[in-house]
Image: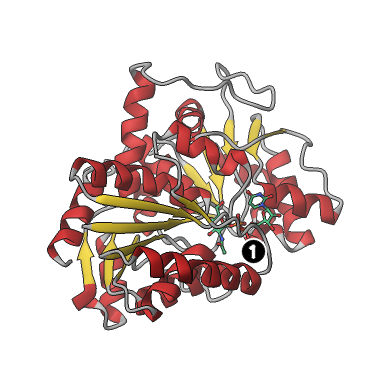
Amino acid sequence: MKVVSIVGARPQLVKLAPMSAAFTTAGHDHVIVHTGQHYDADLSDVFFSGLDIPDPDINLGIGSGSHGAQTGACLSALDPVLQAQRPDWVLVYGDTNSTLAGTLSAVKMHLPVAHLEAGLRSFNRRMPEEHNRVLTDHAADLLLAPTEEAVRHLAAEGLQERTALVGDVMVDVCLRMRDAIRERRVAVPPLPGGIDAEEPYVLATLHRAENTDDPRRLEALAQALADLPLPVLLLAHPRLLSRADEHGLKLERGAVHVGRPLPYAGMVAAVLGSTAVVTDSGGLQKEAYLLGRPCTTLRTETEWPETLTGGWNVLIDNPSILGATRWARTVSRPAPTTHRGQPYGDGTAARRAVEVLEQRV
Ligand code: UD1
């Protein structure tokens, strides 16, 4: 079986790692196409080296741009690549502009497309990721769903026949990395931003367009982090840095220590070392849940509602409405004692995804 994986942004590289390993184990021909949506070494190269992913076979070098320009540039660059490769499956990941472009290019060439992490919904039509998910699911031939909730969403949209529940490949990679860190089989970089790993700290990230692009909202969120009673390590995505710069906002203030994004081993170690996580990232909400750290999510909804069970994750859209004391108490609440179960599977999702691809080729 020949599979072309199309990736472009950081969270897709994390999901690519267990898939790439599973394709290799099963002896399949796996071609990696990187669109170049993320091009900074911190967001791309360190994930290939740190997660033992082979270098991309093809890099389209698309870079940044408006949604239309970025998606369109990916689409036209992918056509000749897929035409030349003619794989049995084109595999797209998650919900970025690269996911949508890969799907459109493949489907118009009558190449079978599988969507990994299908069926997630925020039901917030202002999110670019929501457009990408819905359009990808409706165009793809095979929907590899991570959770039962995702399966229900797909069924509600009439897509049950194309759906297979495989579990979440992020469990595969996250728990494997956790064990490697605990057993000191992997090197972990020191925490950036002058944070003392031995002292309590809050780990924070912020990058979604809904939180970064409106100057007043970004100011309010930056101040909320600054007001927390514990040191906050804010790992700054390039989008956050460039929007803060454009809006004339200083992120480093009060409790906040700004650091560069971490490679995956560093990120998992930083979650394990933290007392709490504050984020708008889908991946980090789930990593906090899997690693047993309470998470506060700066959004009105989540695509991972399982994390909300038992209070492991809490959604806060507007910290200033809570007032400083309740906000601080919410973020630094102790980890719940409730059992988390395995709503995301048992860490064998990549192998199951490969088996489903084999069966339906
Ligand atoms: C993208 C995905 C989002 C995912 C996120 C993970 C879309 C619509 N969004 O958001 O779902 O959660 O990746 O990181 O596809 N930039 C750099 N260097 C880079 C990449 C980006 O400086 O390597 C800057 C550029 O200023 C760019 C901005 O970040 O304009 C936004 O990048 P873009 O790829 O459009 O979206 P993300 O915000 O990273």
Q: Residue furthest bottom?
A: 158
Q: How many marks?
A: 1
Q: Is residue 186 left or right of residue 340?
A: right
Residue that numbered label 1 is attached to: 210
Foreground residue among 15 and 310: 15
Q: Give coordinates of residue 235: x percent, y percent.
A: 63, 38
Is 195 drawn above or below residue 288 in the view shown? above
Q: Residue at x 36, y 38 (%)?
A: 174
Foreground residue among 350 and 254: 350
Q: Is residue 42 left or right of residue 348?
A: right
Q: Residue at x 32, y 45 (%)?
A: 20
User: Dot 1 lies on which element?
Assistant: helix
Q: Residue at x 53, y 57 (%)?
A: 35
Q: Quick check: can you spot residue 9?
A: yes
The kind of residue tagged 1 is Glu
Q: Residue at x 57, y 70 (%)?
A: 71
Is 25 drawn above or below residue 208 in the view shown? above
Q: Give coordinates of residue 221: x percent, y percent.
A: 70, 51
